């Protein structure tokens, strides 16, 4: 039996890894990206585990299968994956994917600002890559409409009763003010943040149904965002860390989570229209984001958001699974 072999190109966006499958996998069938996502879950999970699990990956690895767009108006499609399965949105991954597509020549440069249309499970995203001296310096994407699902939700955890808000930015996120649980968005508190984040996610899903009003496949809490205010002269700034999937930690400021935060900040008036949110991560990387317009989702008030960040290539890989390897596709210790 021949070894299973898969090639990837790795990027990071704000410190968060993104492993792009570039060879060894046939095109994913399906009329929509959600169809392709279901196919990947049913037929390609061995590849996901091979690339995410140890010893080739780690519990915080993230990646994607690149697909055809839904129609001729798109440039790329993408199915995202992580340690627990397949997500409906990934902002940091979108930024990395577009950077890779241009830098690898799959999408041609069309001026200082090159538009790339990407189909993701939650919908179609228009992205704009800023080109300087032939290089992609940053990518901004206009997200699917973001909205507030519910506010003032109380869940019981080992840290006590926690009040949180739930909003959507391509996936559903619970926002928790970190000081409310006696923690800060610092690496020294990361272990505790992971533990509480897991508890919160499970508690919400046990007690509340969280479903997109139009697409029932977009459902459940994807991540828990712990945030705190960041004092910086002349900036509207917050610092956050997102615990998502199975205790996975986003090293970036979390792109789709940033859109979910913008929906809440716009609703409360904390971020005035026209102001840019400087969103910082637990490793001090930054996304710049803003609300650009109003929208509605099944009659619910929503907002259109833009999120901008930069991605950098980190490696090329050719992964192999030896049929005699007793560990198979690998393992996760966390």
Image: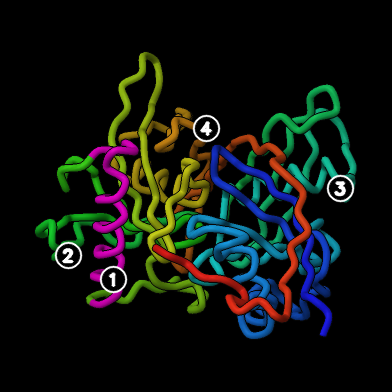
Q: Nearer the viewer, mark 2 or mark 1?
A: 1
Camera-near label (1 vs 3) is 1
Counting other residues with Cα less than 10 Å from the Cα at mark 3, is it few (<14), some (14-19), or many (20 or more)?
A: some
What's the distance in space between the residues labelled 3 and 4, CA to CA? 24 Å
Task: Specify which label sits upstream in the sequence, 4 or 2.
Answer: 2
Query: Residue at 32% across / 76% down in the picture?
Result: 209
Give the quarter of the image for residue 6. bottom right
Of helix, strand and loop, which one carries label 3? loop
Q: How many marks?
A: 4
| Crowd band around label 2 with a 10 angstrom C-alpha radius: few (<14), some (14–19), many (20+) | some
Asked if disc 3 and disc 4 are in contact, CB closer than 8 Å, the reply is no
Mark 1 or mark 3: which comes first in sequence?
3
Image quadrant containing the C terminus: bottom left
Q: Which mark sits nearer the N-terminus, 2 or 3?
A: 3
Mark 1 = which residue?
202
Q: Helix or strand or loop: what does disc 1 sit on?
A: helix
Q: Secondary structure at mark 4?
A: strand
Q: How many C-alpha atoms fall within 10 Å of the one at disc 4: few (<14), some, or many (≥20)? A: some
Label 2 to label 1, Cα distance in Å?
10 Å
Q: Which residues are magenta?
A: 184-206
Is residue 203 located in the magenta-colored stretch of the structure? yes
Q: Position of residue 166 (x, y in %)?
A: 32, 59
Q: Is residue 317 left or right of residue 34?
A: right
User: Coloring scheme of the render?
Assistant: rainbow
Work out whether 303 lies above or below 179: below
Q: Which residue is mark 4?
A: 288
Residue annotated with mark 2: 155
Evaluate whether residue 300 shows in this view. no
Give the Cα separation between the discs numbered 4 and 1: 30 Å
- x 17%, y 55%: residue: 163
Q: Main secondary structure of the magenta part?
A: helix
Query: Which of the marked residues, 2 or 1, is nearer the chain's N terminus?
Result: 2
């Amino acid at each position: 039996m021949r070894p299973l072999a898969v090639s990837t190109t790795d990027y990071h966006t704000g410190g968060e890894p993104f492993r792009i499958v570039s060879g060894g996998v046939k095109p994913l069938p399906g009329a929509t990206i959600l169809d392709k996502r279901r196919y990947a879950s049913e037929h390609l999970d061995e590849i996901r585990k091979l690339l995410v699990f140890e010893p080739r990956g780690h519990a915080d690895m993230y990646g994607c299968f690149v697909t055809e767009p839904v129609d001729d108006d798109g440039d790329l499609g993408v199915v995202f994956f992580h340690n627990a399965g397949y997500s409906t949105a990934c902002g940091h991954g979108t930024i990395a994917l577009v950077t890779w597509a241009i830098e690898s020549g799959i999408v041609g440069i069309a001026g200082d600002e090159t538009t790339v249309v990407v189909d993701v499970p939650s919908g179609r995203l228009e992205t704009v890559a800023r080109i300087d001296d032939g290089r992609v310096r940053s990518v901004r994407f206009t997200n699917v409409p973001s909205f507030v699902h519910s506010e003032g939700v109380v869940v019981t955890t080992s840290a006590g009763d926690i009040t949180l808000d739930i909003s959507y930015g391509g996936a559903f996120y619970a926002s928790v003010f970190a000081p409310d649980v006696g923690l800060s968005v610092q690496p020294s508190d990361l272990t505790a943040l992971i533990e509480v984040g897991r508890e919160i996610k499970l508690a919400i899903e046990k007690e509340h149904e969280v479903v997109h009003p139009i697409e029932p496949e977009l459902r459940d809490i994807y991540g828990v965002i712990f945030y705190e205010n960041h004092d910086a002269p002349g900036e509207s700034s917050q610092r956050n860390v997102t615990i998502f999937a199975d205790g996975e930690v986003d090293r970036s400021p979390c792109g789709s989570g940033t859109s979910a935060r913008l929906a809440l900040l716009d609703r409360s008036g904390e971020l005035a229209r026209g102001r840019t949110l400087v969103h910082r991560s637990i490793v001090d990387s930054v996304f710049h984001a803003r609300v650009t317009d109003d929208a509605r989702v099944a009659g619910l008030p929503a907002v259109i958001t833009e999120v901008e960040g930069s991605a950098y290539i980190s490696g090329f890989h050719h992964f192999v699974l030896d049929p005699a390897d007793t560990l198979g596709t690998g393992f996760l210790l966390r």
